[in-house]
Image (spheres, rainbow, N blue to C red):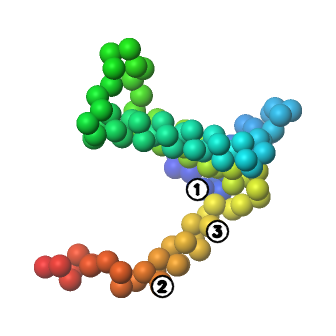
Amino acid sequence: MQEKTMKQMQQEVDEYISQFQEGYFCPLAMLARLTEELGELAREVNHYYGEKPKKATEQEKTIEEELGDLLFVLICFANSLGIDLQAAHDRVMDKFRTRDRDRWTRKEEAK
């Protein structure tokens, strides 16, 4: 499978959603969906790494699948608000490189 840029992923999701008359959900509904997907991810992480094993009756899902669901809804949310996620990512990385540049111990300093 070919690697995609964030712009391509946003376009792919937009083309998919644009097929339907309903289009994107409103921002509040989108936030609820994002929260729901985050809860499902938390549940899977708890099953794999926490103290709460799955019940025999529960459907097998993976953390990868749940992260994919979360990413899809996040892209939908951004698209619905006209937000370029690549630009948002670049801004946050710039913030971490400047504001937080001395916050953590670098690996080369820890030796």
Q: Nearer the viewer, residue 83 or 27?
A: 27
> Can residue 9 be seen by looking at this rendering?
no
Classify mark 1: residues with Cα within 10 Å, few (<14), some (14-19) or many (20+).
few
* Helix, strand or loop status at disc 2: helix
Residue type indicated by callout 1: Thr
According to the picture, the residue beneath numbered tag 2 turns out to be: 98
Q: Nearer the viewer, mark 3 or mark 2?
A: 2
Q: Is residue 26 above or below residue 48?
A: below
Q: Residue at x 63, y 40 (%)?
A: 33
Instruction: Tell me which corner region of the image, top left, top right, bottom left or bottom right, holds residue 50.
Output: top left
**Which residue is tagged 1?**
5
Q: Quadrant of residue 21?
A: top right
Q: Amino acid at mark 3?
A: Ala
Separation (CA) of disc 3 from disc 2: 17 Å
Q: Which residue is mark 3?
A: 87
The answer for how far apart the CA atoms under marks 3 and 1 are is 12 Å
Q: Residue 31 or 102: which is nearer the viewer?
A: 31
Mark 2 or 1, which is nearer the eye? 2
- Who is closer to the viewer here, 16 or 99? 99
Image coordinates for residue 31, horizontal then vertical, percent = 66, 47
Kindly state the secondary structure of the residue where label 1 is placed: loop
Where is residue 7? Give x, y as percent.
65, 56
For disc 2, the neighbor class at 10 Å (few under 14, some 14 to 19, many from 20) is few
